[in-house]
Image (tube, rainbow, N blue to C red):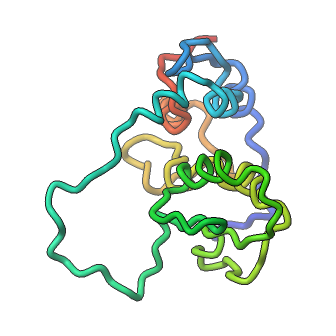
Amino acid sequence: MPFDPKKVEKASNVEKQLSSYKAPCRGCSKKVTLAKMRSHVSSCAKVQEQMANCPKFVPVVPTSQPIPSNIPNRSTFVCPYCGARNLDQQELVKHCMENHRNDPNKVVCPVCSAMPWGDPSYKSANFLQHLLHRHKFSYDTFVVGTAANQSSSRLGPWPVPTDDIPALNQLALASHVAGPYEK
């Protein structure tokens, strides 16, 4: 049976579980419901400090394989304001918030324009709001499911098994929190 988005039911039982389970923030250790963890982590000073102190990835040796030119880069982006290069999605959000918070110019979102459905000519009227609402997390890391079905199960508007505690654990990992959970 093919997926029909018109027949999707809201997974209210999952929302209820996310609102009832608490876990400590990985920065300040404050216990927060999983439903509010992303918001807390994005404003937690200790988490921001930890992220700033993380080492940047540096390859051990340069690759000998050529980089294909016909495949679009959807991993790193160029700042549409100043041209700063090689920013991943989180770095782009942080960079723009720190350096371009008051820039009134309309710009094209590099994340959206890199997507197959993106319009490379569309300029966002409020790019910073767009970044904060649409690109606060990376789609490829927001995965729910056990290790066996992790590649095929994505959290979205479709139902997610509610009796699957490993799924909640994966959600917590995607939210950068530690388990175990408590009610």
- In the picture, measured across the screen, residue 113 lies left or right of residue 48, that is right
Q: In the image, is residue 37 above or below residue 119? A: above
Q: In the image, is residue 113 above or below residue 91? A: below
Q: Residue at x 61, y 29 (%)?
A: 41
Could you tell me residue 110's position as x and y percent?
62, 70
Total marks placed: 0
- In the picture, measured across the screen, residue 166 lies left or right of residue 116, that is left
Could you tell me residue 178's position as x and y percent?
47, 22
Could you tell me residue 62's position as x and y percent?
17, 66
- For the N terminus, give its image quadrant: bottom right
Q: Residue at x 35, y 46 (%)?
A: 56
Q: In the image, is residue 155 above or below residue 168? A: below
Q: In the image, is residue 46 above or below residue 80? A: above
Could you tell me residue 173's position as x and y percent?
48, 34
Q: Residue at x 67, y 20 (%)?
A: 33
Q: Residue at x 37, y 86 (%)?
A: 69
- For the C terminus, give its image quadrant: top right
The residue lying toward the viewer, choosing from 158 and 49, is 49
The residue lying toward the viewer, choosing from 109 and 182, is 109
- In the picture, measured across the screen, residue 136 lies left or right of residue 139, that is right
Is residue 157 in view from this perspective? Answer: no
Is residue 60 in view from this perspective? Answer: yes
The residue lying toward the viewer, choosing from 42 and 107, is 107
Image-quadrant location for residue 34: top right
